[in-house]
Amino acid sequence: MSRIQLVHLAHARSGDKGDTANVGIIAYDPEHYPLLVEQLTSEKVKAFFGPMVKGEVERFELPNLSALNFLLHGALGGGGTMSLMNDAQGKVFSTALLRMEVEVPDDVAKAVRGRGRVPDGWEPKSGAYV
Amino acid sequence: MSSTDRTIRVASGQGFWGDDLEAPVRQVERGPIDYLMLDYLAEVTMSIMQKQRSRDPSAGYARDFVELMERIFPACIEKGVRVVTNAGGVNPVGCADALVEAGRAAGVGGKAKVGLVTGDDLMDRLDELLEQGHELRNMETDEPLSTIRDQVQSANAYIGATPIVKALEKGADVIVTGRSTDTALTYGPLMHEFGWAPDDWNRIAAGVIAGHINECGAQCTGGNCLIDWWKLEGMAEIGFPIVEVSPDGSFVVTKHDGTGGRVTRASVAEQILYEMGDPHEYITPDVIAEFTSIQLEEIGTNRVRVDGVKGRAATDFLKVSIAYAGGWKATGTLTYSWPDAAAKARGAAQILRERLDRLGLEFDEVRTELVGWDSTHGALVGEPPADLPEVQLRVGVRSDDRAAVERFTREIAPLVLTGPPSVTGFAGGRPRVQQIMAYWPALIRKEAVQPHLQVEVKDV
């Protein structure tokens, strides 16, 4: 088994509802969805964020989208206009969770190496990013 | 009620107040669409609009929308594109009046009708509602509204599609609402076109999902999309989404040919998860939609088919968005350079806190972040390296005492000559004191709001 960062297995998006941030995690490859279900328990995610999430962490499964949705309660310093945080609306909580390490079989770790990250030497170009 | 057999194309032109001003123009000009929906509202937006209206009674709506219509009104009328928007914010009447003028200036006088939806604004009825026993408890804290009644600045019910359908039936070409739900701007036109019955839960739920995909503009066509973002092409003219909906509620998400970005299973899935709560119950005024039955399929380049949406009966309640004066805040920044940039920034923050203490100022919260190190991922990133080239110190304070926040704003600049060295980035002057318009979400029984909803259609 190998430990790799979630960023290589999944993409993500987050948003806010009041003082709650949501993080949706989507497996790049539906075959890896069961790994996410097994490893990303609400307890582990709560422990990962530590004091950044004051309330509970709820998890919902969406097998149809190979996705998990997490609700991080009390994560936004009061939320919306009340919050003093740079990320008051939880826009980048998604990428914070992608830092988390998960344990995967060695062949999976090898197959997803570099996935989810900009290739070396990439430069923006006019008209297109490519 | 009309009923058509063909697919209806509802295009998204704005995902928030401040979105790409050229996007709705491209939606109207670059290909066929039947409806253009423009979403301008968010939890925070209503508070900002309320602040503007308190300074100027004619303000409180998205002026961007009126300027946009000056540009596209003639093309919309000529092509038969009907526009549905919640740009009215906390002042839909003012917005509709400005729109009528803009229409005349744009040359569609006598050729167009504007629909105005009112009645979502509960501010004038608040005491009456409280007396009748509507407690408007905070959905997060369960406190009754009476605890902050004196601080309330605005209160609007999230309303559904019924008034939009009515305005369409009355022939409105452009419909302006206040706090319509974002999704109703898409499924309202669908209910009108297909004649879906109010209890046709699965189809209305499908319309809600179509609306949820549309409501954030390009966020489902490659914008803010994490998957392979560096491979996207033509982002300078990114295509906003269009949902092509069939009478049975199934639909295809696409965008105009020749525009940038990308519609894939992954880009649509990311948007579906945006701001999601419990995926088994996405509650709207008209239906409870289910996200766990949705099936996505790529059926062509930039074409994703969405099917299998399930819905069930709506609740007896509407959500209410209440803004209340919740104190004052300010945020100041300074930039520190190598060597030991983070140590200097933290040293400065410590000095600042001591000075605020010695002045006897009281704050509900003082927050220190290092932009360039921990302001997005917090403690997850660990200790900053000594060789960090630079970092921006960002200190925020919040208090009920405006004078304390005001004094804080005068304590940032002195750090430049009285604190740690190699500091810059203070040319912007003192931070601004901001009044906090805090958000109070509540529920209210539908019968307290729905009889008050009004639809008016005016000639341009």
Image (cartoon, coloured by chain):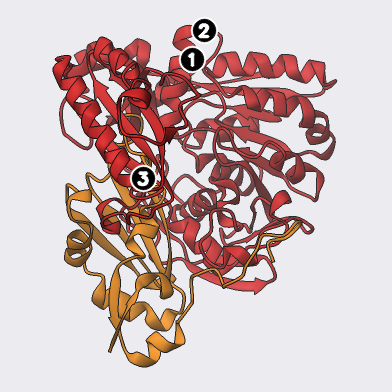
Chain colours: A orange, B red
- Of badges 3 and 1, nearer the viewer stands 3
Q: Residue furthest bottom?
A: A107
Picture layout, residue B349 above or below residue A110: above
* Element type where label 1 sits in the image: helix
User: Circles 3 and 2: CB distance less than 8 Å?
Assistant: no
* Element type where label 3 sits in the image: helix
Q: Which residue is pictured at 40% across the width and 69% down the height?
A: A7
Q: Which residue is mark 1?
A: B52
Q: Which residue is mark 3?
A: B341
- Of badges 3 and 2, nearer the viewer stands 3
| Tag 2: amino acid | Asp
* Element type where label 2 sits in the image: loop
Tag 2 or tag 3, which sits nearer the N-term? 2
Mark 1 closeness class: few <14, some 14–19, many ≥20 residues within 10 Å:
some
Read off the chain for label 1: B
Picture layout, residue B431 above or below residue B193: above
Report which quarter residue B106 is drawn in: top right
User: Circles 3 and 1: CB distance less than 8 Å?
Assistant: no
Q: Which residue is mark 2?
A: B56
- Marks 1 and 2, Cα distance to the nearest angstrom? 6 Å
Looking at the picture, tell me which residue is in the foreground, B20 or B24. B20
In the picture, which quadrant includes the C terminus of chain B? Answer: top right
User: Circles 1 and 2: CB distance less than 8 Å?
Assistant: yes
| Tag 1: amino acid | Gln
Residues beneath discs 3 and 1 located on the same chain: yes
Read off the chain for label 2: B
- Residue A107 location in percent, x, y? 39, 92
* Drawn side of residue B245 relative to residue B389, left or right: right
